């Protein structure tokens, strides 16, 4: 917040030290940019993103279930519209969710790119000179050797190089010294992680923009082609061109559901034929966890159910054989299903339409005069149906569900109930006008979904890179080792001061101990071979 | 043995485990009440490295508890407690093994099995640290106590008869995704407990007095335990979420759909990332960071309980 000072008329024009308006704006922008790209801001934004996701899991979401949202509106007529204005039923596509997402994105770019540049520079600069007082460092100690200083440092340098340190020799004020460094991979891992996060967000957004999916119930013997007109429901990103969909048709030959003894579903499989309508047709079997993957899309089985079939014989003898409609399961355990079969084209007259609405039980059982289902397998299929005659209102222009009758038509008296019965396969219901409805059997249907997400592989790659970067960043350590050679206490030999600085990677103490033990060992073995020492050799730089 | 008797054995082992843990709890209480604080040198191994130790004197790897311990008698309680806990962990593992044999599948197909496995991981992680850093045995009460409570709640509230899983769960991704989730969750539990104790231990004045607080491991040790476990748990959890997304792509046709479970796993991931950041950010180190870790633990528990039991999502068919 800024408070504007009141104008001070008596003061002379501002002194030259005061920056111009342009510079001030520039400074302000720079400060805001710095603030936005600070790590602290990123954490706050991350938290905000997490917090913003919470209502999305506690309130019903349109993207997950339209029905639940409608139910919520019915239960909370006052509250729901207010929540809706705040996009709380579309959290993950709301402007404020996008705002946090974008800010995080910018913040990440702002903090990762400069770091990457700096890392690149650091990769090519030699390790820094040793600090003046090595014994102040957390892990440090002294080693003694009869070797002269330069030879002792040679041994140290050799040992460190074997351990893949980058080593530099310098002639410091306190004597000849060695600086060594390794573990730039840790920082590389860090950058890889943060960059992958960016890539992942990009892939996610791209998939949303150019991806689409459509779902359809397909009864055995039927099929569909990949176009938005054919789907029962579909959703598409804003950049999808509906003329550009993957060209492909699918026919369902057979659907099978298998069950364990205790009626747990053990597998669902759909035998399909698929292919480009112009190209050759292939056969395959898809199922739960095993979609069909082709170039440009995937076909999943997302559900299944039964379509009871009926034969309708009109009084004049005209028969419509085995007409069917999918009935939606209301209970996955018993596959008790509900639905409606609409027959608008039976007679010449608009008022001659017929509809059957009711309940399908794959294994029916009458309990207290009510039909229930006791088994998901079609062992004894039965239906409980109500028959209606009249005008269905299908061409009224108002959309209506395929799975139920339009209640308005019934209330208005345009559609009247003309009969009801519980039928087993082969049994019939005779309507007052002489029409006979026979329950002739059932077919299975599969809920199929075609999905296209061009960002998917990209996201997978980013996720794997993210994990690799994360492991590198967390498990590796960056280590610097310094050694300085000074004359021994009695004037001969060398006292080496040794120290290390570690970042990350767990215990540094034991590692340092191991290193200094190894160095001591190497110095000891090197001693007899290089003797007699030649103290005049100038230290290498 | 028949499947049903194996399943019965599994149930008995569950009770045996709770009983053994209860015995261990009593021993841990005795350890905390009568045990002397161990010497600092041992503690440093677990404490933050790089706090001004000079010389090459840092070789104090944790020696076996009995070997260096002159006043062994009081600390014997710690060893007994740990041993009983280990036996409890064996029978606890037996619960899952027998269930797996009875059902012929991995024993994490429903919430009862999943939660039981998570608690087992917590116990094993604790044993691992308590063996290596003897001083950490002093937090045994605060690990085994919640473990017993959790197991009782699981046994009473989530028990499910041994049986097959639904078609959607028959995938090798069950092994990959759920195993990682169990590992991550179990480790995070230890991390969260350590941070809670750290918050208690690091209150001003906690060092004075002779209450149990002063017998807890030092704040630095607890903080380090919390961090190390979180550092282990975070990539595991990341992997679990990624594997879940891959499985979701095959099973539900999209890799990410903001299903309640997915949403809360993401929230937890973010909170743990924030914890790791906070620990390296000036002004957030210490208590604020520990609070973030505690929030992470609460989110994980919420994710396992509320999201599975109350909200409806695709994951809810995992069964209760
Ligand atoms: C402005 C944005 C960000 C900056 C400047 C930033 C910076 C850093 C730095 C410097 C580290 C290394 C910490 C250290 O070892 O001292 C780090 C680690 C880490 N970052 Fe970020 N980060 C940012 C955003 C994010 C985001 C969005 C995430 C995602 C959740 C994330 C997750 C992590 C994780 C998990 C670590 C590991 C912490 C550890 O080493 O213990 N960061 N980050």
Image (cartoon, coloured by chain):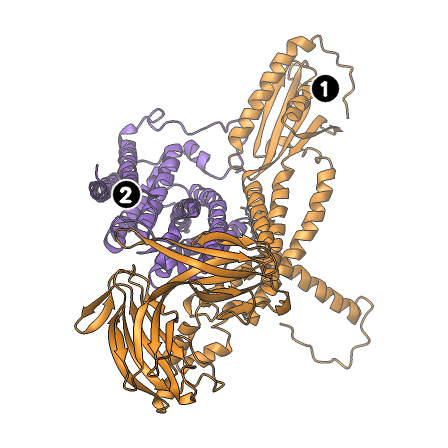
Colour in which the image shows chain A: orange
In the foreground, A236 or B258: A236
Marked residue chain, label 1: A
Depicted A333 relative to depicted A409: above or below: above
The chain coloured purple carries which letter?
B
Q: Is residue B104 left or right of residue A96?
A: left
Task: Let me know if residue A356 appears in the view.
Answer: yes
Please, is residue A110 above or below residue A441 in the view? above
- Look at mark 1 in the image and give the residue it sits on: A150
- In the rendered image, the quadrant that contains the N terminus of chain B is top left
Q: Quadrant of residue B17?
A: top left
Look at 36% across and 44% down and name the residue there. Answer: B122
Q: Which residue is mark 2?
A: B99
* Tag 2 and tag 1, C-beta contact below 8 Å: no
Measured as percent of width and height from the top left, residue A296 is found at 59, 57
Location of residue B265 in the rendering, given as x and y in whole percent from the top left corner: 45, 56
Which element is circle 1 on?
A: helix
Question: How many marks are shown on the rendered structure?
Answer: 2
**Quarter location, residue A129:** top right
Q: From the Cβ of disc 1, is ligand 1 less than 8 Å away?
A: no
Mark 1, other Cα within 10 Å: few <14 / some 14–19 / many ≥20: many
Q: Identify the residue shown where x is 30% and y is 56%.
A: B320
Task: Tell me if B201 is positioned left or right of B84 in this view.
Answer: right
Say what secondary structure mark 2 lies in.
Answer: helix
Q: Quadrant of residue A172?
A: top right
């Amino acid at each position: 917040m800024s408070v504007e000072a009141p104008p001070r008329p008596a003061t002379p024009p501002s002194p030259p030290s005061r920056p111009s308006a342009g510079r001030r704006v520039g400074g302000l922008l720079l400060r805001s940019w710095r603030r936005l790209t600070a790590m602290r801001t990123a954490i706050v934004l991350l938290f905000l993103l997490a917090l913003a996701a919470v209502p999305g899991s506690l309130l019903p979401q349109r993207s997950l279930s339209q029905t639940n949202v409608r139910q919520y509106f019915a239960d909370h007529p006052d509250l729901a519209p207010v929540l809706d204005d705040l996009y709380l039923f579309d959290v993950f596509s709301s402007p404020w969710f996008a705002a946090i997402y974008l800010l995080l994105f910018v913040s990440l770019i702002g903090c990762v790119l400069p770091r990457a540049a700096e890392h690149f520079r650091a990769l090519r600069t030699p390790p820094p000179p040793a600090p003046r007082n090595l014994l102040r460092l957390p892990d440090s100690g002294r080693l003694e050797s009869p070797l002269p200083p330069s030879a002792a440092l040679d041994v140290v340098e050799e040992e460190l190089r074997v351990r893949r340190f980058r080593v530099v020799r310098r002639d410091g004020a306190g004597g000849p010294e060695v600086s060594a460094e390794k573990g730039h991979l840790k920082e590389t891992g860090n950058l890889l992680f943060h960059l992958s996060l960016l890539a992942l967000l990009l892939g996610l957004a791209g998939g949303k923009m150019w991806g689409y999916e459509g779902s359809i119930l397909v009864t055995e013997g039927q099929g569909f082609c990949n176009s938005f007109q054919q789907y029962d429901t579909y959703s598409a990103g804003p950049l999808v061109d509906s003329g550009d969909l993957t060209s492909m048709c699918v026919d369902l030959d057979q659907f099978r559901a298998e069950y364990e003894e205790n009626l747990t579903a053990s597998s669902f499989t759909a035998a399909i034929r698929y292919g480009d309508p112009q190209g050759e047709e292939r056969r395959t079997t898809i199922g739960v966890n095993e979609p069909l993957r082709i170039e440009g899309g995937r076909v999943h089985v997302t559900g299944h159910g039964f379509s009871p079939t009926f034969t309708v014989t009109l009084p004049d003898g005209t028969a419509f054989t085995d007409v069917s409609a999918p009935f939606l399961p209301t209970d996955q355990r018993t596959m008790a299903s509900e639905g409606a079969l609409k027959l608008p084209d039976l007679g010449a007259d608009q008022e001659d339409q017929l509809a059957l609405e009711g309940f399908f039980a794959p294994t029916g059982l009458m309990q207290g005069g009510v039909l229930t289902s006791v088994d998901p397998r079609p062992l004894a299929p039965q239906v409980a149906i109500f028959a209606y005659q009249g005008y269905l209102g299908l061409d009224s222009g108002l959309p209506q569900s395929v799975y139920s009758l339009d209640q308005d038509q019934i209330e208005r008296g345009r559609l009247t109930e003309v009969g009801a019965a519980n039928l087993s396969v082969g049994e019939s219901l005779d309507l007052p006008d002489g029409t006979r409805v026979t329950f002739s059997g059932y077919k299975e249907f599969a809920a199929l979904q075609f999905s296209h997400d061009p960002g998917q592989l990209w996201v997978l790659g980013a996720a794997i890179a993210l994990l690799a970067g994360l492991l590198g960043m967390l498990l590796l350590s960056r280590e610097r080792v310094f050694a300085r050679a000074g004359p021994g206490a009695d004037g001969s030999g060398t006292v080496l001061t040794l120290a290390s600085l570690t970042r990350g990677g767990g215990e540094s103490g034991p590692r340092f101990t191991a290193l200094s033990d190894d160095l001591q060992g190497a110095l000891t073995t090197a001693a007899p071979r290089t003797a007699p020492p030649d103290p005049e050799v100038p230290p290498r730089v | 043995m028949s499947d049903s008797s194996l399943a019965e054995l599994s149930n008995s082992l569950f009770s045996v485990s709770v009983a053994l843990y209860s015995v261990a709890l009593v021993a841990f209480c005795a350890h905390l009440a009568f045990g002397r604080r161990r010497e600092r040198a041992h503690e440093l191994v677990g404490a933050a490295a790089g706090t001004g130790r000079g010389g090459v004197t840092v070789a104090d790897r944790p020696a076996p508890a009995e070997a260096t311990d002159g006043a062994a008698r009081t600390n014997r309680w710690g060893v007994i407690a740990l041993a009983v806990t280990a036996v409890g962990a064996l029978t606890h593992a037996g619960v899952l093994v027998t269930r797996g044999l009875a059902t012929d599948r991995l024993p994490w197909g429903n919430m009862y099995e999943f939660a039981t496995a998570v608690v087992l991981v917590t116990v094993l992680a604790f044993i691992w640290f308590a063996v290596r850093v003897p001083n950490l045995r002093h937090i045994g009460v605060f690990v085994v106590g919640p473990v017993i409570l959790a197991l009782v709640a699981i046994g009473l509230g989530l028990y499910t008869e041994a049986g097959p899983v639904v078609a959607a769960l028959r995938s090798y991704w069950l092994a990959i995704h759920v195993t990682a989730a169990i590992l991550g969750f179990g480790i995070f539990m230890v991390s969260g407990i350590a941070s809670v104790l750290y918050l208690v231990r690091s209150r001003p004045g906690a060092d004075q007095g002779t209450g149990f607080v002063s017998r807890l491991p030092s704040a630095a040790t607890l903080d380090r335990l919390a961090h190390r476990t979180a550092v282990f748990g975070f990539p595991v959890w990341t992997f679990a979420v990624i594997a879940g997304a891959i499985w979701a792509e095959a099973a539900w046709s999209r890799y990410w759909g903001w299903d309640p479970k997915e949403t809360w796993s993401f929230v937890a991931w973010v909170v743990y990332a924030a914890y790791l950041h906070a620990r390296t950010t000036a002004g957030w180190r210490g208590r604020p960071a520990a609070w973030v870790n505690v929030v992470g633990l609460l989110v994980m528990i919420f994710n396992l309980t509320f999201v599975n039991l109350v909200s409806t999502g695709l994951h809810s068919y995992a069964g209760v």
